[in-house]
Image: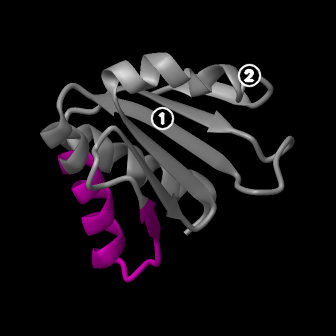
Amino acid sequence: MNTEQLVDLLVEACDNKRAEEIMKFDVRETSSVTDCYLICHGNSDRQVQAIADEVMDFCKEREMDYLIEGYREAKWVLIDVNNVVVHVFHKPEREYYNLERLFKYGERVEV
């Protein structure tokens, strides 16, 4: 599975749990860490965890390895899936940290 296919499926997983303002940043040209970042948010701790659960279930179904941080607190969950990093925020934290400004040099696509 290439990066574009993986991103599309991860976007679908986030969307399944009604993630809001899903943004994709293609940083292949500017980063040696990953190919793509996905950023989205939920409006409650439960929704943030539900979005993260859906991404983890997607990975488990396909026997893909992933790393996750921040799940228990449910304010900013980071899920590293191969060459894509998914950031699932609680809305106030997304506004506060404003990661979108950090990736301004990558290709930004609202999905």
User: Gap between marks 1 and 2, in whole Å?
Assistant: 13 Å
Residue bounds of the magenta highlight? 50-68
Q: Taking 58 as reference, is 106 above or below it?
A: above
Marks 1 and 2: CB-CB under 8 Å?
no
Q: 75 and 104: which one is in front?
A: 75
Image coordinates of residue 90 in percent, x first then y, are 31, 30
Say if the magenta span includes residue 62.
yes
Say if the magenta span includes residue 16.
no
**Secondary structure that dominates the magenta span:** helix
Indicate the amino acid at tag 1.
Ile
Q: Which residue is mark 2?
A: 104
Q: 33 and 28: which one is in front?
A: 33
Image-quadrant location for residue 18: top left
The number of discs equals 2
* Residue at (61, 23) in percent of width and height: 100
Q: Residue furthest front?
A: 73
* Residue at (44, 78) in percent of width and height: 64
Q: 9 and 79: which one is in front?
A: 79
Image coordinates of residue 36 in percent, x first then y, are 64, 47
Q: Which residue is mark 1?
A: 39
Image side of residue 94 versus residue 56, left or right? right
Mark positioned earlier in the residue sequence (1 or 2)? 1
Secondary-structure class at tag 2: loop
